[in-house]
Amino acid sequence: MLGSSAVLGDIDLYADHSDFFSWSTDLQIERDGLMHGVAGWFECELATDVWMTNSPLAEKPIHRYQAFLPINEAVKVNAGDTVKATVMARPADHLIAWVVKFPATGQRSRIRLGR
């Protein structure tokens, strides 16, 4: 991993939601390298102070795969860079899309999967 994790968004399963989700975050690059995509995982509070996660950084993660959202081509990043990531989803249509922007170079990757 080229940097520490960042929170992308929250979903309250007790609340009503629109049919479309969109989250954005800034990712801080901590070491030089080639970026091939964005990894994702979840943390879920089951009850007060009772959590589960599939984070590869967790001491005791559950055994579920993390998500990997690839970019069009690998991009060289440097420690101190900021990468901007937006993930959009329309679950009822089995649609997910993501945009990853590299302000330092002006590069951008946009991918859409689903119907």
Image: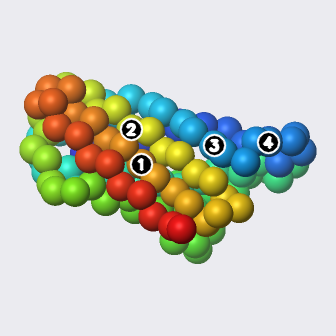
Determine contact: label 4, label 3, CB under 8 Å. Answer: yes
**Sequence-wise first label, 1 or 4:** 4
User: Going by the picture, which residue comes out furthest to the front?
Assistant: 115
Q: Which residue is disc 2 drawn over?
A: 85
Q: Which of marks 4 and 2 is in front?
A: 4
- Residue drawn at 21 percent across, 26 percent down: 103
Q: Position of residue 53 (x, y in %)?
A: 63, 57
As drawn, the label of residue 98 is 1
Q: Which SS class for mark 4?
A: loop
Q: In which quarter of the image is residue 28?
A: top left
Q: What element does badge 3 sit on?
A: strand
Amino acid found under the numbered disc labelled 4: His
Residue 59: x and y in percent read: 54, 57
Q: Is residue 35 rendered to the left or right of residue 40? A: left
Query: Disc 3, disc 1: CB below 8 Å?
Result: no
Instruction: Report the residue at 16% width, 56% height from top.
Output: 73
The answer to whether residue 29 is above or below residue 76 is: above
Look at label 2 and name its amino acid. Answer: Ala
Instruction: Identify residue for label 4.
Output: 17
**Residue 86 vertical position relative to residue 114 in the rendered view, above or below:** above
Q: Which amino acid type is shown beneath numbered disc 1?
A: Trp
Residue 21's label in the rendered image is 3
